[in-house]
Amino acid sequence: MIKKTESAYENFGAFCRRNDLADMEEAIELFAVFGGLNKPFERQKGVMEALKESILEHYALLYKKASDYTANNPALHSLLSGVALGDGRIHSAYKKARLGKNEGAPLVHKALDSGIVELISSETLKMSRVEGEESVSDKLYFASPFMRFWFAFVALIYKSIKSKEYKEFEERFNAHKQELFEHTFLRLGHQLLAKRFSNDPFVRLGEYWDQKEQLDILGTTASGRRVAGICRYSNSKVTKSELSKLQAKAKSLHIDADIYVIIAKRGFSSELKAMKSDSLLLLSAKNLKELIG
Protein backbone atom coordinates (compact mmCIF):
# COMPACT_ATOMS: atom_id res chain seq x y z
CA MET A 1 0.00 0.00 0.00
CA ILE A 2 2.88 2.39 0.74
CA LYS A 3 5.51 2.70 -1.97
CA LYS A 4 8.95 2.00 -0.59
CA THR A 5 11.48 1.78 -3.39
CA GLU A 6 11.42 5.17 -5.13
CA SER A 7 10.69 8.80 -4.37
CA ALA A 8 6.95 9.30 -4.69
CA TYR A 9 7.58 12.94 -5.62
CA GLU A 10 8.61 11.67 -9.05
CA ASN A 11 5.07 10.33 -9.51
CA PHE A 12 3.18 13.62 -9.15
CA GLY A 13 2.04 13.48 -12.78
CA ALA A 14 0.66 9.96 -12.40
CA PHE A 15 -1.05 11.02 -9.15
CA CYS A 16 -2.79 13.89 -10.94
CA ARG A 17 -3.87 11.73 -13.86
CA ARG A 18 -5.16 8.95 -11.62
CA ASN A 19 -7.24 11.36 -9.53
CA ASP A 20 -8.30 13.63 -12.41
CA LEU A 21 -6.67 16.70 -10.84
CA ALA A 22 -6.51 19.79 -13.05
CA ASP A 23 -6.33 22.51 -10.38
CA MET A 24 -2.67 22.51 -9.33
CA GLU A 25 -3.23 24.13 -5.93
CA GLU A 26 -5.68 21.36 -5.05
CA ALA A 27 -3.27 18.81 -6.48
CA ILE A 28 -0.36 20.08 -4.35
CA GLU A 29 -2.35 19.89 -1.12
CA LEU A 30 -3.79 16.45 -1.81
CA PHE A 31 -0.40 15.16 -2.94
CA ALA A 32 1.19 16.49 0.26
CA VAL A 33 -1.03 14.09 2.20
CA PHE A 34 -1.74 11.18 -0.15
CA GLY A 35 1.37 11.14 -2.35
CA GLY A 36 2.94 7.68 -2.22
CA LEU A 37 -0.13 6.12 -0.58
CA ASN A 38 -1.79 3.82 -3.10
CA LYS A 39 -5.26 4.33 -1.67
CA PRO A 40 -8.38 5.99 -3.16
CA PHE A 41 -9.89 9.09 -1.57
CA GLU A 42 -12.87 11.38 -2.13
CA ARG A 43 -11.34 14.67 -3.28
CA GLN A 44 -14.73 16.41 -3.53
CA LYS A 45 -14.94 16.53 0.27
CA GLY A 46 -11.74 18.54 0.71
CA VAL A 47 -8.40 17.59 2.22
CA MET A 48 -9.54 17.27 5.84
CA GLU A 49 -12.55 15.05 5.20
CA ALA A 50 -10.64 13.00 2.63
CA LEU A 51 -7.81 12.23 5.02
CA LYS A 52 -10.21 11.41 7.85
CA GLU A 53 -12.06 8.87 5.73
CA SER A 54 -9.07 7.38 3.93
CA ILE A 55 -6.34 7.62 6.59
CA LEU A 56 -7.53 8.25 10.13
CA GLU A 57 -10.44 5.80 9.92
CA HIS A 58 -7.92 3.15 8.82
CA TYR A 59 -5.28 4.02 11.40
CA ALA A 60 -4.62 0.44 12.57
CA LEU A 61 -3.88 -0.89 9.09
CA LEU A 62 -1.71 2.06 8.09
CA TYR A 63 0.16 1.90 11.40
CA LYS A 64 1.21 -1.64 10.57
CA LYS A 65 2.42 -0.53 7.15
CA ALA A 66 4.36 2.43 8.57
CA SER A 67 5.93 0.13 11.14
CA ASP A 68 7.53 -1.83 8.31
CA TYR A 69 10.05 1.01 8.19
CA THR A 70 10.66 1.31 11.93
CA ALA A 71 10.19 -2.18 13.40
CA ASN A 72 8.18 -0.41 16.12
CA ASN A 73 11.32 1.27 17.44
CA PRO A 74 10.06 4.19 19.61
CA ALA A 75 13.33 6.11 19.30
CA LEU A 76 13.24 5.83 15.51
CA HIS A 77 9.61 7.01 15.54
CA SER A 78 10.69 10.04 17.57
CA LEU A 79 13.58 10.79 15.21
CA LEU A 80 11.35 10.58 12.12
CA SER A 81 8.79 12.85 13.75
CA GLY A 82 11.61 15.27 14.52
CA VAL A 83 12.56 15.24 10.84
CA ALA A 84 8.94 15.70 9.72
CA LEU A 85 8.29 18.59 12.11
CA GLY A 86 11.42 20.54 11.27
CA ASP A 87 13.46 21.60 8.27
CA GLY A 88 15.03 18.15 8.00
CA ARG A 89 18.42 19.00 9.47
CA ILE A 90 19.75 15.96 11.28
CA HIS A 91 21.07 17.87 14.28
CA SER A 92 17.70 19.60 14.72
CA ALA A 93 15.89 16.27 14.50
CA TYR A 94 18.12 14.91 17.27
CA LYS A 95 17.11 17.82 19.50
CA LYS A 96 13.40 17.45 18.77
CA ALA A 97 13.63 13.73 19.51
CA ARG A 98 15.78 14.36 22.59
CA LEU A 99 18.51 12.12 21.26
CA GLY A 100 22.25 12.53 21.46
CA LYS A 101 24.38 12.04 18.37
CA ASN A 102 25.62 8.67 19.59
CA GLU A 103 22.02 7.48 19.97
CA GLY A 104 20.71 9.18 16.87
CA ALA A 105 23.36 8.29 14.28
CA PRO A 106 22.54 4.53 14.18
CA LEU A 107 18.84 5.41 13.84
CA VAL A 108 19.59 7.66 10.88
CA HIS A 109 21.38 4.75 9.19
CA LYS A 110 18.39 2.49 9.83
CA ALA A 111 16.03 5.07 8.34
CA LEU A 112 18.23 5.48 5.28
CA ASP A 113 18.55 1.73 4.81
CA SER A 114 14.75 1.33 4.96
CA GLY A 115 14.27 3.83 2.14
CA ILE A 116 11.84 5.98 4.10
CA VAL A 117 14.21 8.97 3.93
CA GLU A 118 17.02 10.19 1.72
CA LEU A 119 20.10 12.18 2.68
CA ILE A 120 20.35 15.70 1.24
CA SER A 121 23.46 17.87 1.46
CA SER A 122 23.68 21.62 1.06
CA GLU A 123 24.89 22.82 -2.33
CA THR A 124 28.20 23.92 -0.85
CA LEU A 125 29.77 27.07 -2.24
CA LYS A 126 33.22 26.59 -0.77
CA MET A 127 35.72 24.04 -2.05
CA SER A 128 37.23 23.71 1.41
CA ARG A 129 36.04 24.60 4.87
CA VAL A 130 37.54 27.35 6.97
CA GLU A 131 39.40 25.99 9.99
CA GLY A 132 37.21 26.22 13.08
CA GLU A 133 34.04 26.87 11.08
CA GLU A 134 30.97 25.09 12.42
CA SER A 135 29.86 22.23 10.18
CA VAL A 136 26.59 22.39 8.29
CA SER A 137 24.19 19.58 9.12
CA ASP A 138 22.88 17.40 6.30
CA LYS A 139 19.12 17.03 5.93
CA LEU A 140 16.83 14.03 5.79
CA TYR A 141 13.90 14.22 3.37
CA PHE A 142 11.08 11.71 3.25
CA ALA A 143 10.86 9.84 -0.03
CA SER A 144 7.07 9.85 0.25
CA PRO A 145 4.84 12.88 1.04
CA PHE A 146 2.49 10.57 2.92
CA MET A 147 5.19 9.36 5.29
CA ARG A 148 6.18 12.93 6.08
CA PHE A 149 2.52 13.68 6.81
CA TRP A 150 2.22 10.54 8.94
CA PHE A 151 5.19 11.25 11.18
CA ALA A 152 4.34 14.96 11.50
CA PHE A 153 0.65 14.66 12.28
CA VAL A 154 -0.29 11.10 13.20
CA ALA A 155 2.56 9.21 14.87
CA LEU A 156 2.86 11.46 17.94
CA ILE A 157 -0.86 11.63 18.78
CA TYR A 158 -1.85 8.10 17.84
CA LYS A 159 -3.77 7.45 21.07
CA SER A 160 -6.55 9.94 20.32
CA ILE A 161 -6.67 8.91 16.66
CA LYS A 162 -6.83 5.24 17.61
CA SER A 163 -9.83 6.14 19.78
CA LYS A 164 -11.37 7.95 16.79
CA GLU A 165 -11.13 11.31 18.54
CA TYR A 166 -9.87 13.73 15.89
CA LYS A 167 -10.03 17.15 17.51
CA GLU A 168 -6.34 17.13 18.50
CA PHE A 169 -5.39 16.02 15.01
CA GLU A 170 -7.47 18.75 13.35
CA GLU A 171 -5.89 21.44 15.53
CA ARG A 172 -2.40 20.12 14.83
CA PHE A 173 -2.99 19.82 11.09
CA ASN A 174 -4.56 23.25 10.72
CA ALA A 175 -1.71 24.84 12.69
CA HIS A 176 1.10 23.26 10.66
CA LYS A 177 -0.30 22.26 7.26
CA GLN A 178 1.29 25.30 5.62
CA GLU A 179 4.77 23.90 6.25
CA LEU A 180 3.68 20.57 4.78
CA PHE A 181 2.39 22.24 1.61
CA GLU A 182 5.45 24.50 1.31
CA HIS A 183 7.82 21.55 1.47
CA THR A 184 5.85 19.64 -1.17
CA PHE A 185 5.72 22.70 -3.43
CA LEU A 186 9.49 23.13 -3.20
CA ARG A 187 10.18 19.49 -4.04
CA LEU A 188 7.87 19.68 -7.05
CA GLY A 189 9.41 23.02 -8.05
CA HIS A 190 12.82 21.36 -8.33
CA GLN A 191 11.34 18.74 -10.64
CA LEU A 192 9.69 21.42 -12.75
CA LEU A 193 13.03 23.22 -13.10
CA ALA A 194 14.78 20.03 -14.13
CA LYS A 195 12.21 19.57 -16.89
CA ARG A 196 12.45 23.21 -18.00
CA PHE A 197 16.23 22.90 -18.35
CA SER A 198 16.18 19.56 -20.20
CA ASN A 199 18.10 21.08 -23.13
CA ASP A 200 20.85 22.18 -20.74
CA PRO A 201 20.39 19.74 -17.88
CA PHE A 202 21.47 20.39 -14.34
CA VAL A 203 24.60 18.65 -13.19
CA ARG A 204 23.73 19.85 -9.68
CA LEU A 205 20.39 21.06 -8.39
CA GLY A 206 19.33 21.44 -4.78
CA GLU A 207 19.16 23.86 -1.89
CA TYR A 208 21.80 25.87 -0.10
CA TRP A 209 21.87 26.34 3.64
CA ASP A 210 24.41 27.20 6.27
CA GLN A 211 24.19 28.36 9.88
CA LYS A 212 22.53 31.65 8.89
CA GLU A 213 21.18 31.54 5.36
CA GLN A 214 18.80 29.41 3.32
CA LEU A 215 18.34 29.41 -0.46
CA ASP A 216 15.55 27.25 -1.90
CA ILE A 217 17.15 26.72 -5.29
CA LEU A 218 20.79 26.54 -6.30
CA GLY A 219 22.01 24.67 -9.33
CA THR A 220 24.53 24.50 -12.12
CA THR A 221 23.70 23.36 -15.64
CA ALA A 222 25.85 21.33 -18.01
CA SER A 223 26.90 24.50 -19.84
CA GLY A 224 28.00 26.07 -16.55
CA ARG A 225 25.07 28.43 -15.98
CA ARG A 226 24.40 29.15 -12.31
CA VAL A 227 20.76 29.21 -11.23
CA ALA A 228 19.56 30.65 -7.90
CA GLY A 229 16.00 31.00 -6.73
CA ILE A 230 13.25 31.00 -4.16
CA CYS A 231 9.93 29.20 -3.78
CA ARG A 232 6.89 30.90 -2.21
CA TYR A 233 3.69 29.06 -1.29
CA SER A 234 1.55 32.06 -0.41
CA ASN A 235 -1.84 33.41 -1.45
CA SER A 236 -0.22 36.75 -2.25
CA LYS A 237 1.42 37.52 -5.56
CA VAL A 238 5.19 37.87 -5.40
CA THR A 239 6.46 41.40 -6.00
CA LYS A 240 9.67 42.99 -7.23
CA SER A 241 10.91 43.31 -3.64
CA GLU A 242 11.29 39.51 -3.42
CA LEU A 243 13.56 39.56 -6.45
CA SER A 244 15.64 42.31 -4.84
CA LYS A 245 15.96 40.22 -1.67
CA LEU A 246 16.97 37.16 -3.70
CA GLN A 247 19.63 39.11 -5.58
CA ALA A 248 20.97 40.59 -2.33
CA LYS A 249 21.15 37.15 -0.71
CA ALA A 250 22.97 35.70 -3.72
CA LYS A 251 25.46 38.54 -3.56
CA SER A 252 26.05 38.00 0.17
CA LEU A 253 26.75 34.32 -0.55
CA HIS A 254 29.09 35.23 -3.42
CA ILE A 255 26.81 33.52 -5.95
CA ASP A 256 27.24 34.92 -9.44
CA ALA A 257 23.87 33.80 -10.80
CA ASP A 258 23.22 33.72 -14.53
CA ILE A 259 19.52 33.03 -13.99
CA TYR A 260 17.25 33.93 -11.11
CA VAL A 261 14.16 31.78 -10.56
CA ILE A 262 11.06 32.53 -8.52
CA ILE A 263 8.41 29.84 -8.14
CA ALA A 264 5.21 31.21 -6.59
CA LYS A 265 1.86 29.64 -5.78
CA ARG A 266 -0.30 32.54 -6.97
CA GLY A 267 1.96 34.20 -9.51
CA PHE A 268 3.47 37.67 -9.68
CA SER A 269 2.77 41.38 -9.68
CA SER A 270 2.50 43.13 -13.04
CA GLU A 271 5.73 45.00 -12.30
CA LEU A 272 7.65 41.77 -11.72
CA LYS A 273 6.14 40.01 -14.74
CA ALA A 274 7.31 42.89 -16.91
CA MET A 275 10.88 42.09 -15.84
CA LYS A 276 10.87 38.52 -17.21
CA SER A 277 13.91 37.86 -19.36
CA ASP A 278 16.49 35.23 -20.19
CA SER A 279 17.98 35.91 -16.75
CA LEU A 280 14.69 35.87 -14.79
CA LEU A 281 12.40 32.84 -14.86
CA LEU A 282 8.99 33.13 -13.18
CA LEU A 283 6.92 30.00 -12.56
CA SER A 284 3.62 29.53 -10.72
CA ALA A 285 1.70 26.53 -9.40
CA LYS A 286 -0.14 26.37 -12.72
CA ASN A 287 3.14 25.48 -14.44
CA LEU A 288 3.21 22.18 -12.55
CA LYS A 289 0.83 20.90 -15.21
CA GLU A 290 4.00 20.42 -17.25
CA LEU A 291 4.83 17.48 -14.96
CA ILE A 292 1.60 15.69 -15.79
CA GLY A 293 2.47 14.91 -19.40
Image (spheres, rainbow, N blue to C red):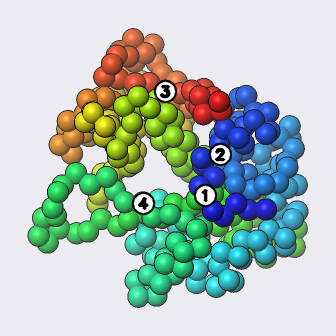
Task: Tell me where residue 193 appears, x and y as whole percent.
Answer: 46, 35
Tag 3 residue: 283
Above or below residue 91? Residue 56 is above
Name the residue type under label 2. Answer: Asn
Which mark identifies residue 14? none
Question: Reading the chain from its start, which is encountered first: label 2 or label 1?
Answer: 1
Question: Which marked residue is nearer to the observer: mark 1 or mark 3?
Answer: 1
Question: Which marked residue is nearer to the observer: mark 3 or mark 4?
Answer: 4
Tag 2 residue: 11
Decide if residue 241 is on the left or right side of residue 253. Answer: right
Question: Which marked residue is nearer to the observer: mark 1 or mark 4?
Answer: 1
For mark 1, does the 10 Å Cα neighbourhood hold few (<14), some (14 to 19), or many (20 or more) residues? Answer: few
* Distance from Cα at disc 3 to Cα at disc 4: 24 Å
Question: Reading the chain from its start, which is encountered first: label 3 or label 4?
Answer: 4
Tag 1 residue: 6
Label 1 SS: loop
**Do the residues under discs 2 and 1 have CB atoms within 8 angstroms?**
yes
* Quadrant of the frame with the C terminus: top right
